[in-house]
Image (tube, coloured by chain):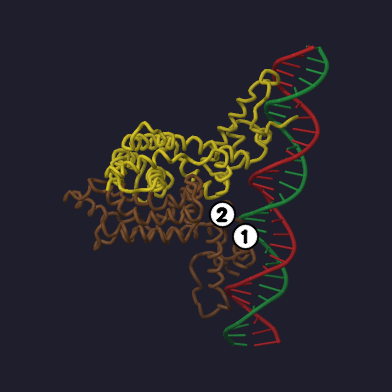
Chain colours: A brown, B yellow, C green, D red
DNA sequence: CCCGATATTAACCGCATGGTTAAACCGATC
DNA sequence: GATCGGTTTAACCATGCGGTTAATATCGGG
């Protein structure tokens, strides 16, 4: 009875693949994803995950060992689904900043709109266990800012942009894109937005954000 | 033995104020503030709060009844310490937007710098229990956006600003100001910032943010 | 100096929850 | 059809934690 708690899969998929196997693992992962994002790790019970996966609680431990390990996996998964969408575009040397920014804005507003808990979950986990991201980034490395840094510098030399560190560029972009989703309940209350109001807010945002951001870059 | 769990203080402060009384209550509140902001509500133990206050665990319940009630109090307190700093300035009809924005930026960067856990805590709690803010805002009302809305409209009519809803204005401002603090661990990892790097980042931010934001407003 | 009211504590309780275990199950292989 | 390895489950265990209780300390007033 060897527990497959490690991420390494079955060595020989041909033998000993009775039925579901990997599929069950996926079901649990998806369930954990849903539950953790909705409640945050600390407010989630492994039982709830098991139920959502239609599976016995012990099976969760069978596959992932501990709740913390599963939480790590989900966090990594979430982060891994977000970062490339932003930095994948930013790192592209073929496109100009004027092209990248609107593309990212559109993409992110769609992405976050479809995942109401996503932003809040990420920030929440970041706050609950700041060391985790250090651990995860260790393998994965930092993000390549060189392309965006070069484009900013060249734009500045041409008088097109103000002088601005790539760090500020990234911080501004992420703050403008993600924060409203992360504090949505507060924002809706504060601005007295119902569901329709929120949709309208996002609609206007999709329109104005690229201009706002690009205008901010100019001197 | 009447529990003072309600927020109403002693009716007659003269009689029955043996020693510390209100002072103890404050100590517990401060301890709870520190602990909750550091760990988040879900990851905090009442025992830890009691210890930090130098007090027996039962006393926490004696004063505040339940952990949730105490958590509510701390959340309200935190929110109440943030909002006026932003909306107090924004609502001032005497100052122009050009004056307000730099003032808020300076103030917020100082405020958040001195409170590393603050932003992360707020977003985290917002995510963990979105209904809470509804409850709290019920008494307290929404924020007065009319001043800023008027100033934006007049600025737009004068060709000074782009057409922009006050909601977007607020969302942008808060995102730019608060988000970097809320995700600090990630940002430091991502941008490979050590403590000194983070300070430099904030220094640059203090400089560029007012210009960036105001430039974004112009057409 | 005692009385009554509040403040504070030690000890306790019940329960939810993360994790374990041993048995049952299932499909393949011989 | 017996065996074997991986899979799934029911039952169980230990304990951390929120909350209660009853007893003690503290102090002001009569």
Report which residue position mark 2 lands on.
A39
Give the residue drawn at x 45%, y 37%.
Answer: B115
Which element carries disc 1, helix, strand or loop? Answer: helix
Which element carries disc 2, helix, strand or loop? Answer: helix
Residue at far left of view: A158
Left or right: residue A30 compared with residue A143: right
Left or right: residue A156 compared with residue B72: left
What chain letter is assigned to the residue under label 1? A
- Check residue A65 in the rendering and tell me which mark sits there, or answer none: none
Residue A12: percent from left, percent from top: 50, 77
Residue C8 vs A194, above or below: the answer is above
Give the residue drawn at x 55%, y 63%.
Answer: A64
Report which residue position mark 1 lands on.
A48
What chain letter is assigned to the residue under label 2? A
The quadrant the N terminus of chain B occupies is top right
Rendered image quadrant of residue B71 = top right
């Amino acid at each position: 009875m060897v527990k497959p708690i490690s991420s390494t899969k079955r060595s020989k998929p041909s033998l000993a693949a009775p039925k579901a196997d990997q599929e069950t693992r996926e079901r649990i992962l998806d369930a954990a994803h849903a539950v953790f994002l909705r409640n945050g790790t600390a407010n989630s019970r492994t039982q709830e995950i098991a139920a959502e996966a239609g599976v016995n609680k012990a099976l969760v431990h069978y596959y992932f060992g501990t709740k913390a390990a599963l939480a790590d996996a989900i966090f990594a998964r979430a982060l891994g689904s977000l970062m490339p969408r932003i930095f994948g575009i930013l790192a592209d040397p073929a496109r100009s900043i004027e092209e990248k920014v609107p593309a990212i804005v559109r993409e992110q507003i769609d992405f976050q709109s479809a995942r109401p808990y996503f932003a809040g979950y990420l920030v929440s986990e970041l706050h609950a266990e700041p060391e985790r991201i250090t651990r995860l980034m260790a393998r994965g490395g930092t993000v390549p800012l060189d392309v965006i840094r070069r484009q900013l510098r060249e734009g500045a030399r041409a008088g097109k942009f103000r002088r601005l560190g790539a760090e500020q560029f990234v911080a501004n972009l992420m703050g403008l894109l993600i924060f409203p989703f992360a504090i949505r309940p507060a924002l809706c209350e504060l601005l007295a937005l119902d569901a329709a109001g929120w949709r309208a807010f996002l609609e206007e945002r999709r329109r104005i954000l690229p201009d706002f951001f690009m205008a901010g870059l100019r001197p």
